[in-house]
Amino acid sequence: MLELDHFNHGLLTPILAYLMSFIGSVLGLRCAVHARSSRWPGGWLVAAAVALGGCGIWVMHFTAMLGFSVQGMTLRYDVPMTLLSAAIAIVVVWIGLSIVVRVRREILALPIGGAITGVGVAAMHYLGMSAMHVGAHVEYNITLVALSVVIAVVAATAALWFMLHVHGFGATLGAAVIMGLAVCGMHYTGMAAMSAQHGNHGAVTKGVEPVQLLTPLIMTVTLITMMLIVLVGLAEVDAPSRRDSGADDEEALADSGRSWPRLDPYSEAPRQAPAPQQPVPTAVSLRAASRAADQPGRSPR
């Protein structure tokens, strides 16, 4: 049995992994808030899926894997499979968001969306593990694997619930703290299920070393994260002016098939339609009212 080290660089990688999960969760939740206040939420849902699935889940996974090592073995990664795992993370989060948006009954949408997203996130994790070639025979404890899948489903369901109900920025930060812990807990539970034994010593380990993936990963993640921060930041600045300008037609929005109410990103309640304006009295209406007052029993025409 080979010795596995999940903290090869000490606490650096788990702290960085949690930080990435936290940042991705904050951005994803804020994108979801703005999706609820937008007439066309599709773009915001894609942004939320990239933020949470890409940054908050997949980047967290890969960052934590940088601190993983197997005694006496060189780790290499299959690049296409690694990128496929990233795509799966983004797509399953988008599917879960789409379900809770389109299905009007939350009691059905949350379990279905959470189950699909959670199983997809677990599949992303183990696909990413399969993309890691260590030159050894790898086995998994089925009990811990099942536990990691359960954690993933619960975490995904909680994330979708937060995206439906969290409004204020302070609440977003608190929800992101919980989501970051859940995602990291799922990852390290899955890693604890892994064990490795000596394999074929003559086999050639294919793929690229983690360091070779590190530079393009940092550049890509930094660029995408900055773009999301700018996007969310501009929306946060613009939200008060949109709130002051009044709400759009709520009935047309309800008939459009989207179940989320139009929300103000800075309010805890759906925006209310402005009260109908009273007609302004005119000179003609005032003279008619005066004649009616002078002649009881007659109503003005």
Image (cartoon, helix red, strand yellow):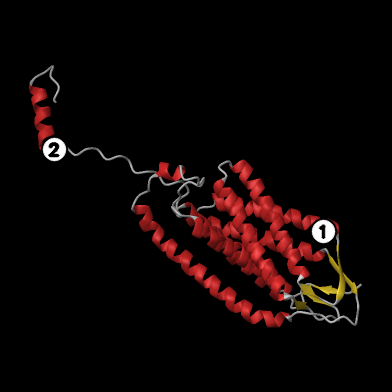
Q: Is residue 170 visible?
A: no
Residue 197 image point, x, y percent? 90, 72
Left of 229 or right of it: where is 69? right
Tell me the kind of residue under disc 2: Thr
Q: Quadrant of residue 121?
A: bottom right
The tag earlier along the polypeptide, 1 or 2, is: 1
**Rendered view: 140 above or below 13:** above
- Secondary structure beneath dot 2 equals loop
Left of 88 or right of it: where is 269? left
Residue 182 image point, x, y percent? 68, 59
Q: Residues within 10 Å of mark 2 (few under 14, many from 20)?
A: few
Residue at position x 32%, y 40% in the image: 275
Tell me the kind of residue under disc 1: Leu
Q: Is residue 116 visible?
A: yes
**Rendered view: 62 above or below 296:** below
Residue 235 image point, x, y percent? 44, 62
Residue placed farthest to the top in the image?
Answer: 297
Quarter of the picture holding the C terminus: top left
Residue at position x 37%, y 48% in the image: 248
**Rendered view: 161 above or below 285:** below
Residue 66 image point, x, y percent? 72, 76
Q: Residues within 10 Å of mark 1 (few under 14, many from 20)?
A: some
Quarter of the picture holding the N terminus: bottom right
Which residue is label 2 attached to? 282
Which residue is label 1 attached to? 144
Residue placed farthest to the front in the image?
Answer: 80
